[in-house]
Image: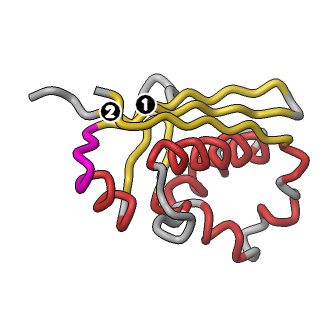
């Protein structure tokens, strides 16, 4: 059963290159350490960060949550063995998902620079 959907589109130029510096607090407030490490392995870290930012916004919207209830760095989007993006929830995002019975978050990320787009579906799987 679908509990929520969310989508986001972003002009990647809005995500300033300067805010993606390891010394910028924006990076830690928005991305997990594992996402930052994965971005550093990419030739185009800026596109990686932009698609993940849109993905986090789409997941947030799928929650239908109050803006202050979930932090973006509690939503982690990493590539699996095939490179497909997978969502892992941490902290309050995880607790909120559990409280509404969410068992999985599907995500799709795409880009045609300067635009990036994300679509998320929050699901409760039948037992």
For mark 1, what is the residue?
Answer: 106
* Residue 71 picture location, percent across and down: 52, 66
Position of the C terminus, as image quadrant, is top left
* Residue 26 picture location, percent across and down: 71, 70
Say if 22 sits above or below 57 in the image.
below
Disc 1 on helix, strand or loop?
strand
Identity of the residue drawn at 46% across and 68% down: 69
Identity of the residue drawn at 48% across and 50% down: 64
Q: Is residue 27 magenta?
A: no
Identity of the residue drawn at 46% across and 61% down: 74
Identity of the residue drawn at 51% across and 63% down: 66
Q: Which residues are magenta?
A: 98-103
For mark 2, what is the residue?
Answer: 123
Query: Which sits earlier in the primary sequence, circle 2 or circle 1?
Result: 1
Front residue of 92 and 29? 92
Q: Which mark is residue 56?
A: none
Say if 124 sits above or below 41 in the image.
above
Per the model, the C-alpha gap separating discs 2 and 1 is: 8 Å
Front residue of 80 and 6? 6
Q: Is residue 101 magenta?
A: yes
Q: Quadrant of residue 19?
A: bottom right
Color scheme of the displayed model? secondary structure
Disc 2 on helix, strand or loop?
strand
Mark 2 and 1 residues: CB-CB less than 8 Å, in contact? yes
Task: Determine crowd level at label 1: few under 14, some 14-19, many 20+ residues with C-alpha closer than 10 A.
Answer: some
Q: Quadrant of residue 91?
A: bottom left
* Residue 27 picture location, percent across and down: 68, 66
Task: Determine crowd level at label 2: few under 14, some 14-19, many 20+ residues with C-alpha closer than 10 A.
Answer: some
Please state which of the two labelled residues, at mark 2 or mark 1, is closer to the viewer: 2
Q: Quadrant of residue 1?
A: top left
């Amino acid at each position: 059963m679908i509990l929520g959907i969310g989508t986001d589109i972003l002009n990647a130029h809005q995500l300033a290159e300067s805010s993606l510096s390891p010394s910028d607090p924006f990076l830690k407030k928005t991305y997990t350490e594992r996402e930052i490490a994965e971005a550093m392995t990419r030739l185009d870290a800026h596109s990686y960060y932009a698609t993940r930012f849109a993905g986090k916004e789409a997941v947030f919207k799928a929650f239908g949550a109050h803006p202050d209830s979930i932090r973006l760095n509690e939503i982690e989007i990493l590539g699996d063995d095939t490179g497909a993006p997978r969502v892992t929830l941490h902290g309050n995002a995880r607790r909120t998902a559990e409280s509404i019975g969410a068992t999985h978050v599907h995500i799709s990320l795409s880009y045609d620079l300067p635009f990036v787009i994300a679509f998320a579906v929050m699901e409760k799987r039948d037992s």
